[in-house]
Amino acid sequence: MPFPYAIPDFVAEIPNVLADDAKRISANTWTALVTRAILERYSQDAPLYLVSDVEGNGTNYIPLPAAPGEGADLPVWESNFSVIQQIEFPIGQQPPQLILDSDFRVYRTPGQPDQILINFDTPQEGDSLRVTWTARHLRDGSTVPDKDFYAMTDFAASLGAENLASFYVGTGDSTMQADVVQYRSKSAEMLKCAAALRKRYYNHMGVEEGTTGEDEVGPAFSLGNQYLEQNSGVDRLVHNKYSR
């Protein structure tokens, strides 16, 4: 199964890591679990990196990047997910000329589309800026690379194991104690299986088990060198911003 993959490829691989001979989880449910794993956990741990060229317009504001290509099924910018990694401007310099991280940000205006605000450069009409940014992986699984195929399968299977654990907890005749104990035992086994599959996924991805994929909250205040930190991105009397 070479890249690119589709959801059925992940679903077909799951029986190799999690047995469900009784078919208690339907094909539609497996599709939903794989899709959830791609859009939520995997996209947080390994977001899709894209490079898009954006045209200047004679102001300090430029549009947000759009995924290159044609068609409706393309990665999209999400305000609460996507991040700008770098902006190259002007394009074609050697070494590449990058705008400082402190000199651009996503600017939000009530009732208007978000834009990129560049503090000290004003790209003119006809100027192009090369923006590297992140997005969620496509829900059809086609953007998951070969190296992460089996890890993604493990995480989706862990969601299925939790699903089976819930099934066993709610199964059994409460008037027959032996029956209840048997199903509770199966539920516990499924939870252990889910934990083992998630651990295998975390180990492959190189992330700490239980991490949310989000940055931790910083300290309420911090101490630093005023010379280096105050009004970052602004020229000083002696040293300009590009020499610091």
Image (spheres, rainbow, N blue to C red):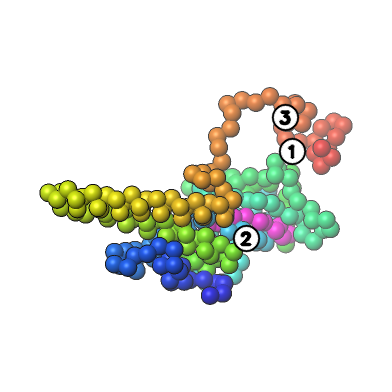
The answer to whether residue 49 is left or right of residue 72 is: right
Q: CA distance from mark 1 to mark 2?
A: 26 Å
Q: Residue at x 82, y 32 (%)?
A: 236
Numbered tag placed on residue 50 in the rendering: 2
Residue 155 in view here: yes
Residue 36 in view here: no
The residue labelled by disc 3 is: 230
The answer to whether residue 86 is left or right of residue 3 is: right
The amino acid marked with disc number 3 is: Gln
Q: Residue at x 39, y 60 (%)?
A: 33
Numbered tag placed on residue 47 in the rendering: none
Task: Residue 85 in the image: state x and y as whole percent.
Answer: 65, 51
SS at mark 3? loop
Q: CA distance from mark 3 to mark 2?
A: 32 Å
For residue 135, what is the image quadrant? bottom right
The residue labelled by disc 1 is: 233
Q: Residue at x 24, y 53 (%)?
A: 182
Q: Nearer the viewer, mark 3 or mark 2?
A: 2
Magenta residues (range)? 127-138
